[in-house]
Every structure is written in C-alpha cells, then in structure tokens.
Amino acid sequence: MRMDSERLDFPSFKVSACCSPGEQDRKSHHSDQVKNSLLSRLNRIEGQVRGIKGMIEKDIYCDDVLNQIASVQSALNGVGKLLLENHLKSCVIERIQEGDTEVLTELMITINKLMK
C-alpha cells in the first residue's frame, strides 16, 4: 500500500456525453478507462484509510498518522480533479451548447464545495 503523497498526472481520456439537462436522474457515462482509473484510485484510498485506522489502533505517533491523513486528502483531491476535468469536457460543454447556462451556476457551487 502506497502511503506517501504522490503527484497525480492525468492522462488524456476519451470522454463521452454524460448528462442531459432536465433529467432528474442524470448519469455520467465515463469511458471504461476513466471509470477504471477512478475505481483504482478509490480502492487505493480505501486501503490507505484502513491503514490509518490500524495506525491509530496501534498507537502510532500522531505526526505519522497526520501525514497519512494528508496523503489520503491529496489522493481524494486527485480523484476530484479527474472527475471535474471529465465533467467540464463532456457534461458542461454539452449543456452549454444546448443553451443551458444553469450548468455554470451548478459548476460554481460544486467548485466551491471542492475548494473548502
């Protein structure tokens, strides 16, 4: 399990349309490559969180635990960046081209949440 902070480079992924305005049950349509990358990253993060839990159970020095928490937060930010990039390249562009500018308000609310 990799526990140190790593810089996450995002390869170019082919994106497909992901949502239609007005639909209550909008769904994303990630390519298999994007979905697999997201799931792999989340599985790794899940392992890191279990590792942190084990560190606390073993009374590991607080600073070491805090460093691992920072690593998990960084990894989650990487997942968010990848999702945001694909959302911008597909859903947002598609909805703007269809004349739905409400997507910009939705996007700004989401970005503000991600930046907290």
Image (cartoon, grey):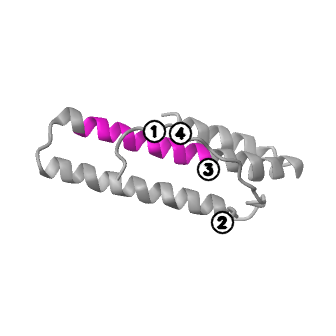
> How far across and how far down the image is residue 54, in percent?
20, 53
- Nearer the N terminus, badge 4 or badge 2? 2
Mark 4, secondary structure of its residue: helix
> Residue at image x 66%, y 47%?
11
Residue 29 vertical position relative to residue 82 in the rendered view, above or below: below
Q: CA distance from mark 2 to mark 3?
A: 14 Å
Q: Which residues are magenta?
A: 65-83
- Label 1, residues with CA under 10 Å away: few <14, some 14-19, many ≥20: few
Given the image, on which type of amino acid does mark 1 rest? Glu
- What is the number of the mark on residue 32? 2
> How far across and how far down the image is residue 108, in percent?
65, 37
Foreground: 9 or 53?
9
> Mark 2–mark 1 contact, CB under 8 Å?
no
Q: For residue 72: magenta?
A: yes
- Label 4, residues with CA under 10 Å away: few <14, some 14-19, many ≥20: few
- What is the number of the mark on residue 83? 3
> How far across and how far down the image is residue 69, in percent?
32, 41
- Nearer the N terminus, badge 1 or badge 4? 1
39 relative to 59 in the view: left or right: right
Label 1: which residue?
A: 6
Question: Mark 2 or 3, which is nearer the eye?
Answer: 2
> Residue at image x 69%, y 50%?
86
- Nearer the N terminus, badge 3 or badge 1? 1
Given the image, on which type of amino acid does mark 2 rest? Asp
- What is the number of the mark on residue 95? none
Label 4: which residue?
A: 114
Given the image, on which type of amino acid does mark 4 rest? Leu
